[in-house]
Image: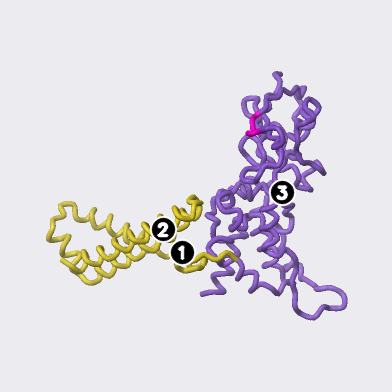
Amino acid sequence: MVTNITNLGRSGLSDWLIQRVSAIILAVYAVFMVLYLLFHPGLDYATWSGLFSQTWMRIFSLLAFISIAAHAWVGLWTVSTDYLKQTGARFAFQAVVMLAIFVFLVWGVQVLWGA
Amino acid sequence: MSTLQISIYRYNPETDSVPYMQEFELDTQGRDIMVLNALEMIKQQDSSMAYRRSCREGVCGSDGMNMNGKNGLACVTPLSEVVKDNKLVLRPLPGLPVIRDLVVDMGVFYKQYESIQPYLQNDTTEPTMERLQSPEEREKLDGLYECILCACCSTACPSFWWNPDKFVGPAGLLQAYRFLADSRDTATRERLARLEDPFSLFRCRGIMNCVAVCPKGLNPTRAIGKIREMLLSNAT
């Protein structure tokens, strides 16, 4: 048993499950986006804005944002514990990643509900 | 038939400041001998060259080494299987400290093996004769008990290279599952609890290097998947 405090879930099992579930959500969102763009070749601002003014699309998008935040954190935390052996550098990297994810998530919420 | 060019990793910590590669030429007289036989012929040329060997038939697991980039047992690997362009490069198993030449310090590997408590644990009353298993229950141990702990798999695994002190590694995890799958073992819950953290088991990324090199044809990746399934069904 190895303990680790910077891993949010403190559990390899929950990290593993988060990674798989968030990957499915992101795949569905990506496929939806590609199909939407294919079916709207002459996409204008009004149509695009109309899509994101609907509540289901905002919920779907927020779900994808949270998934990418969780997925990126688990993945980059793993990368840092594999390759960054110096504690200070590893902690600094993790702090920067966490801050970036937090900023992007809040910003994403603002974009979705702000307009 | 030209002579075989063999390049061997040499390092003697008492005299060398850095490791170096030494070139040898070997006339195999056209025979397809095992890499270990070739090493023994080279030892006739230079008796200072060190490697481990014992049974010379793939049972003891002593002569695990890196042959032209791939881990394996020198005693059961014929030259025809590894030699390319008449060249053979022999290095110690990657990722472990080198004691001398092809001899590595397996301490961290054994420590991980020890961490999974590789012995039967049963807290029920002992029967007078023995703990019986049905043929079906015994069958579950096939593909698990055959491991000879040669360390070819764990030292081919990048996750083990980066975190040998935290990640149990394929060899240890195969044995962890060998005891989880044993109908006579009652410590399942405790065994699973020790593997649930982000490193011990879950550092496996499923790249299957372990499966590709195992000289016994075992499948640690499948065992790791089975442990994940057990953890998941216990926790959801």
* Amino acid at dot 2: Gln
Residue A114 is situated, as x and y percent measured from the top left of the image, at 18, 67
**Relative depth, front residue between A43 and B22:** B22
Residue A115 is situated, as x and y percent measured from the top left of the image, at 15, 66
Chain A's colour? yellow
Vertical arrangement, residue B165 with respect to residue B101, above or below: below
Element under label 3? loop
- Does residue A100 show up? yes
Residue B199 is situated, as x and y percent measured from the top left of the image, at 55, 60
Magenta extent: B17-21
Location of mark 3 (residue): B150
Q: Is residue B130 magenta?
A: no
Report if the CB atoms under discs 3 and 2 are less than 8 Å apart. Answer: no
Location of mark 2 (residue): A94
Residue B188 is situated, as x and y percent measured from the top left of the image, at 66, 72
Location of mark 1 (residue): A6
Q: Residue at x 32, y 59 (%)?
A: A100
**Relative depth, front residue between B159 and B233:** B159
Query: Which one is in front in this view, the residue at disc 3 or the one at disc 1?
Result: 1
Q: Residue at x 49, y 66 (%)?
A: A5
* Amino acid at dot 1: Thr
The alpha-carbon separation of the residues under discs 3 and 2 comes to 36 Å
Colouring style: by chain
The dominant secondary structure in magenta is: loop
Chain B's colour? purple
Residue B188's label in the rendered image is none
Q: Are marks 1 and 2 on the same chain?
A: yes
* Amino acid at dot 3: Cys
| Pointer 1 or 2: first along the chain | 1
